[in-house]
């Protein structure tokens, strides 16, 4: 059996899900940051109590199709006008709950809240996770000489494990 230093990995496909529980985006490459892939599950839909909403209870969330552009995230859904969200703008800080974890986030405002409320048929708000807050599943340190990037179709030999949320 090969040791970890002898393993290589080839990515055949890679998807980002900018909004947790909404549709994903096929990408050829993604920046790997301390908490995982940049913009992957950076936003989340929550209820009035700040509890996350998922496809398990609201299957329509799968119909929300994101597009990442240079300066904004565009969300589209059947019967709805496109929602444009600036990548560098947030509104009020808040605390939200994902499973048993309470985390810091930023509310994305009343327009985004109304858009999700209208589409999902129940009160909902869109929040963005605080990029300064480290996820409980994120690594505690990264030892890289440069900013790592994951690419599809490329084979990389690694001396560290490549499973999970690696640096």
Image (spheres, rainbow, N blue to C red):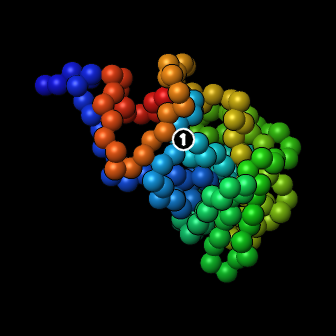
**Above-or-below relation of 110 to 29:** below
| Quarter of the view holding residue 73 | bottom right
The total of numbered circles placed on residues is 1
The image quadrant where one finds the N terminus is top left
**Above-or-below relation of 73 to 39:** below
For this view, does 27 lie left or right of residue 9?
A: right
Q: Within 10 angstroms of label 1, few (less than 14), some, or many (20 or more) residues?
A: some
Counting from the top left corner in percent of width and height, residue 43 is at 66, 49
Counting from the top left corner in percent of width and height, residue 48 is at 77, 52
- In depth, the one of 30 and 59 nearer the eye is 30
Residue where numbered disc 1 is placed: 31
Counting from the top left corner in percent of width and height, residue 128 is at 71, 45
Q: At 49% across and 28% down in the image, what residue appears?
A: 167
Visible in this render: residue 48?
no
Q: At 60% across and 52% down in the image, what residue appears?
A: 18
For this view, does 131 lie left or right of residue 64?
A: right
Q: At 57% across and 34% down in the image, what residue appears?
A: 33
């Amino acid at each position: 059996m090969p040791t970890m230093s002898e393993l290589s990995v080839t990515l055949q496909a890679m998807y980002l899900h900018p909004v947790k529980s909404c549709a994903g985006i096929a990408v050829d490459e993604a920046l790997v940051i301390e908490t995982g892939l940049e913009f992957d599950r950076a936003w989340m839909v929550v209820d009035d109590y700040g509890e996350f909403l998922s496809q398990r209870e609201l299957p329509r969330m799968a119909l929300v199709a994101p597009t990442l552009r240079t300066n904004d995230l565009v969300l589209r859904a059947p019967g709805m006008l496109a929602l444009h969200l600036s990548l560098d703008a947030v509104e009020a800080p808040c605390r939200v709950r994902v499973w048993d974890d309470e985390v810091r986030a930023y509310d994305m405002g009343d327009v985004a809240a109304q858009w999700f409320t209208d589409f999902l048929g129940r009160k909902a708000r869109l929040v963005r996770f605080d990029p300064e807050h480290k996820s409980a599943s994120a690594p505690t340190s990264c030892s890289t000489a440069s900013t790592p990037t994951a690419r599809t179709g490329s084979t990389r030999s690694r001396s560290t494990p490549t499973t999970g949320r690696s640096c």
